[in-house]
Image (cartoon, rainbow, N blue to C red):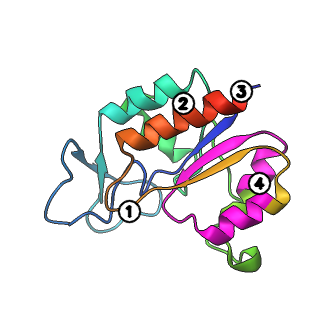
């Protein structure tokens, strides 16, 4: 069974914290109205068209899963713009709630979703506390990759994910 690749949208795919007046190089601007953005201007989302192909290439080694507050809406708003098929998603039971031992609120649910499977998780809110928590509680290999929300995923990130999967599968 392939390891999971748990994909956050805002930060890794949408470098939302980049300078607002300058779109990051290679990214395209999209205006979106997911649930919760019904009033005012649509949400500005920057996406890199090449990221879809990069993720699809990783699908040979991983099972791709959305791990984002967009939940299933990532399949409607993000995936089609990147050329991705519909992906399973983590349906967070509680979003932005309390988390154990100072960890990010998603971490406990990521472990629950992964079960005993190996996983790589890309997110802009991962800290050393999350890594420690996962190391102590997860029975399989796990890679927690922090992605700078000002930059998004880069070539070295995709290379590191491919190399990690190759080591885990061997």
Cβ–Cβ under 8 Å for marks 1 and 3 = no
Q: CA distance from mark 3 to mark 2?
A: 24 Å
Residue drawn at the location 20% of the way across and 41% of the way down: 26
How packed is label 4: few (under 14 Cα within 10 Å), some, or many (20 or more)? some
Which range is magenta? 110-135
Residue 25 placement, left or right of 73: left
User: Is the residue 153 above or below the residue 59 in the image?
Assistant: below
Query: x, y percentage for residue 133?
Result: 75, 66
Q: Of the residues tagged 2 and 1, which is closer to the observer?
A: 2
Q: Of the residues tagged 2 and 4, which is closer to the observer?
A: 4
How packed is label 3: few (under 14 Cα within 10 Å), some, or many (20 or more)? few
Q: Secondary structure at mark 2?
A: loop
For marks 1 and 3 on the same chain, the one whose residue lies earlier in the sequence: 1
Cβ–Cβ under 8 Å for marks 3 and 2 = no
For marks 4 and 3 on the same chain, the one whose residue lies earlier in the sequence: 4
Residue drawn at the location 76% of the way across and 75% of the way down: 100
The residue that mark 2 highlights is: 86
Query: x, y percentage for residue 129?
Result: 67, 71
Residue 26 placement, left or right of 141: left
Residue drawn at the location 74% of the way across and 58% of the way down: 109
Q: CA distance from mark 4 to mark 3?
A: 19 Å
The residue that mark 1 highlights is: 38
Query: x, y percentage for residue 140?
Result: 81, 44
The residue that mark 4 highlights is: 111
Give the label on residue 169, or none.
3
Q: Secondary structure at mark 1?
A: loop
Q: Residue furthest top?
A: 60
Q: CA distance from mark 1 to mark 4?
A: 32 Å
For marks 1 and 4 on the same chain, the one whose residue lies earlier in the sequence: 1
């Amino acid at each position: 069974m392939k390891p999971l690749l748990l994909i956050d949208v805002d930060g890794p795919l949408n470098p939302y914290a980049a300078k607002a007046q300058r779109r990051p190089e290679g990214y395209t601007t999209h205006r979106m109205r997911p649930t919760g953005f019904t009033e005012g201007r649509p949400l500005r989302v920057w996406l890199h068209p090449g990221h879809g192909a990069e993720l699809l290439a990783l699908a040979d080694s991983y099972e791709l899963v959305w791990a984002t507050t967009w939940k299933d809406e990532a399949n409607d708003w993000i995936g089609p713009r990147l050329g991705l098929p519909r992906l399973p998603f983590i349906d967070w039971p509680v979003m932005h709630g309390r988390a154990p031992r100072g960890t990010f609120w998603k971490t406990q649910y990521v472990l629950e979703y992964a079960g005993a499977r190996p996983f790589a998780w890309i997110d802009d809110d991962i800290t050393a506390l999350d890594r420690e928590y996962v190391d102590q509680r997860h029975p399989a290999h796990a890679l927690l990759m922090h992605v700078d929300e000002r930059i998004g995923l880069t070539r070295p990130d995709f290379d590191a994910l491919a190399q990690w999967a190759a080591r885990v599968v061997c």
